[in-house]
Amino acid sequence: MSDQAINSGDNDELQALFDSIVNAGASKPAAAPPPAAAQAVVDDASSRAAAFTAAIETLDEPARSMFSSIGQLTRKVHDALREMGYDKSLEKAAAAIPDARDRLAYVATLTEQAANRTLNAVDAAQPLLNRIESDSATLQADWDKLFAKQLSLDEFKNLVGRTREHLKTSAHGAKVTNEQLLEIMMAQDFQDLTGQVIKKIVDMAKEMEGALLEFLVQFSPAGMGGGAPQKTLAEIDSSLENGPVYKTDGRTDVVTDQAGVDDLLASLGF
Amino acid sequence: MTDKNMRFLVVDDFSTMRRIVRNLLKELGFSNVEEAEDGQVALHKLKSSQFDFVVTDWNMPNMTGIELLRAVRADPTLKHLPVLMITAEAKKENIVEAAQAGASGYVVKPFTAATLDEKLAKIFQNMNK
């Protein structure tokens, strides 16, 4: 919706809305207006108001008063939307979608980086710890032999030398492992960053929802507004590729943990 | 006794998840692990070389895990392969669908090393029967 269209007080959306109301009215048998009159309303945009009034004049009660109140209502809704800034908020909401997409891409990138950093740190530290563990076991076995007086002097000298070397290796290993642990800790900073971004997206979604809901409530024919979003949700739900279940409250069609999977499979005989 | 040299194919479109599964398998003593980023690549690898075990995600581009499972079961040379699904899809429908398509096991994400170990053990047990 451009500013110009808003300022002129007339635009395609209003026209389309207007047409749909006219057509909806025409489809009701009891209140059917003469087709020619209705057509004139649709075709001639500049003299629309006049034609509308003229068309109403040709109608009988109660169709006449009904059309007249629909016309007034439409104008009122349009003016109210402008006054309350809904046209702007809808515009803002539409503009926010590419922004949200970028933010989500950012979240995906950051979390991937964090996972890789963490896994790299584990890869770096594990071999060192494995070596310290196996060396310690060997040395301990040899020291046990010494205490059991099973070692010669030369073997003892060798053991002392290896033990000294082992202490050096261990100190180095501990230092490197500590660095990697720090790295793992630092990699978690994505939580802070993505948390902020996600919070912004949630706020934005709320704002969009509010604006769109208001719009729907004002404009949708009675009985249709509330049902539509729920149907969409059900449609998404019927698919088998939904990704993680981020909200299990009030849902009976999902399992919440591995035990649920196992119970279900067992109950089916698998 | 399970052959620790058996060859695994880990199928997931997220490299981090492939890495985690690979590390967990290594932790359990299985270091002969190959990776594929979707069902199509996996099927090609399965047909062109010898594997003993398939671990697959569900939701992937090109060819999903369930399609891969069906393709494996439909292929006379591959149908004996154990297929363990590790996926975030937690709807009962999904689990039933996978079981009916012939999955050897089903693990929901997020999962632990202990869960993976337990499911693998159960599958090996069934294989040796």
Image (cartoon, coloured by chain):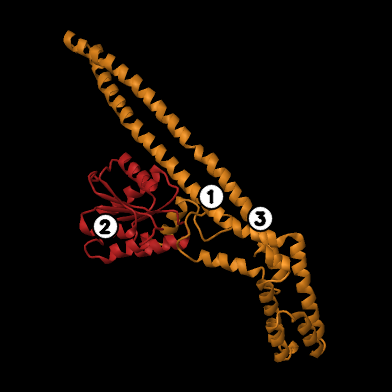
Instruction: From the viewer's perspective, tell me whether residue B33 is left or right of residue A269.
Output: left
Instruction: Answer with mark 1 or mark 3, whichever residue precedes in sequence.
Output: 1
Query: Circle 1 sits in a helix, a strand or a loop, which is it?
Result: helix
When asked about the image quadrant of residue A119, the answer is top left
Q: CA distance from mark 1 to mark 2?
A: 41 Å
| Crowding at mark 1 (Cα within 10 Å: few <14, some 14-19, many 20+) | some
Which residue bears the numbered disc 2?
B81
Q: Which chain is red?
A: B
Please state the horizontal and vertical placement of residue A84, each as a whole percent of the image: 76, 60
Query: Circle 2 sits in a helix, a strand or a loop, which is it?
Result: loop
Q: Which chain is orange?
A: A
Kindly identify which numbered label has been placed on residue A10: none
Q: Residue at x 77, y 87 (%)?
A: A55
Which residue bears the numbered disc 3?
A207
Please state the horizontal and vertical placement of residue A105, each as a whole percent of the image: 49, 50
Which residue bears the numbered disc 1?
A103
- Up-down relation of residue A45 to residue B7 (above or below): below
